[in-house]
Amino acid sequence: MTWQRRWLGLGWAVILGWAVSALGADQAVPAKIRVLIIDGQNNHNWRETTPRMKKILEECGRFTVDVATAPEKPRVPPKPKTDDPAALAKYAEAKAAAEKALPAYQAAMAKFRPAIENYDVVLSNYNGDPWPAEFQTALDDAVKSGRLGLVIVHAANNAFPGWKEYNQMIGMGWRSKDYGDRLKLDDTGALIRVPKGADEGSGHRYTGEFAVVIRDPQHPITRGMPREWMHARDELYDNMRGPIENVHLLATAYSKGTKAHEPMIWTVAYGKGRVFHTPMGHDVAAMRCVGFAATLQRGTEWAATGEVTIPLPANFPGPEKSSTAP
Ligand SMILES: [Zn+2]
C-alpha cells in the first residue's frame, strides 16, 4: 500500500466514523423546531424585541430561529406646530422624500413573501401594513391545515383588523369596542363574555408589575407553573376584542384599570392548527421576565408540535416577586 492509499483509507475511516456518529446523534436528539419571526413594521421597538425573542428561543436549545423583515414603510413626519420657516421647510422636504419613496416601498411590499414552507412555526412581531393577499392565503392555509404553528406576541394582535381569518386565528386583539366581544373573569373565576359595544375599547389602563393567574394548570404550556406568578413591568392589555372562537384561556391578570381579570395567555384551535397568543411583551424589559421567557419557549414549542418538553427554570417567578434575566 502506498502512503497515498494509506492516507485515503484513513480518510474514509474518519468520514465513515463521523457519519455513523451523526446518524446515532440524529436518532437520540429530536430535530430542532424551525421558527420564523416576522417583523419590520411595528409601533414597538422590534429592532430590540426580535433579537431578544430569538435569544430566548435559541438558548433553550430546542429551536433554530430565522427572521423575515418586511420592507420599511417611508414615514411622513408629523407637521411641526410652529411658524418657523426653517422648521417648515425641513418638514416639507422630509414629507416630499417620504412620498417619493412610497412607490418603491409599495412594490417591495407587494413581493413580501416569507418562505413559511421551510418552518414549523411563525412568530409574529409585526404590526403594520397588510401583507400581500397571496401571503395571507398561504399563511392561513398552512396554519389551518396544522402544518404550521402560529405565535402572537403583544402588538402583533393590533395588526390586520380587516383580515377576517387573522382575527379568527388570534381569537381577540387590540380593537375598538364595536369590533367584537370580549372575555373577562369575575372574582369567583366565572367567565363572562361581554358583547361588542359594552365595556370599553382595547387599551392598557394599567402598566406595571402584575400577577399572572393560571386558569388551566393541566395544559402542557402552563403545567408546573405556580398558580400565580409575578410578571415584570409591562402593559396590561385589556378589553381585547374579536370573534373569540375556539379560544382556550390559560391565564389571566387582574387589571387595576378595568377592575377585571383580563385574558393574558391563551391558545386558539384554528382548523387543525394551533395558535399560541400572549399580549405580554411590550419591550425588552418586560421580556427579561423569566416567566415571559419560559411561557414563550413553551408556547412556541406547543404551537409547533402540540407538546411541551421544555422544563421550567429554577428561577421561575412566584406570587410575591418577579424574576428577571440579565
Ligand atoms: Zn406595547
Image (cartoon, rainbow, N blue to C red):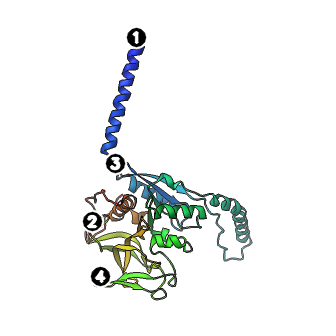
10 Å neighbourhood of mark 1: few (<14), some, or many (≥20)?
Answer: few
Name the one closer to the observer, 172 or 212.
172
Name which residue lies at 26% across and 72% down.
Answer: 227
117 or 53: nearer the viewer: 117
Question: Where is mark 4, residue-wise?
Answer: 189
Q: Residues within 10 Å of mark 2 (few under 14, many from 20)?
A: some
Q: Earlier in the sequence, mark 2 or mark 3?
A: 3
Local secondary structure at mark 3: loop
Q: Amino acid at mark 3?
A: Pro
User: Hey, what amino acid is under mark 2?
Assistant: Arg
Q: Name the residue beneath numbered marker 3.
A: 30
Discs 3, 1 touching: Cβ within 8 Å = no
Question: Sequence order check: which comes first, mark 3 or mark 1?
Answer: 1
How far apart marks 4 and 3 lie (CA) works out to: 39 Å
SS under mark 2 = loop
Q: Which mark is residue 2?
A: 1
Amino acid under disc 4: Gly
Q: Residue furthest bottom?
A: 198
- Does ligand 1 reach within 8 Å of label 1's beta carbon? no
Mark closer to the observer (4, 3): 3
Q: How far apart in space, not on screen, are marks 2 and 3 (Cα)?
A: 21 Å
Marks 3/1: CA–CA distance: 43 Å
Crowding at label 4, few (<14), some or many (≥20) Cα neighbours within 10 Å?
few
Residue at mark 2:
223
Residue 43 position within the rendered picture, expressed as x and y whole percent measured from the top left? 54, 68
Please state the horizontal and vertical placement of residue 287, each as a whole percent of the image.
40, 63
Check the image and report above or below for 61 versus 188: above
Point out the frontmost of discs 1 and 4.
1
Under mark 1, the amino acid is Thr
Is residue 294 in sight in this rendering? Answer: yes
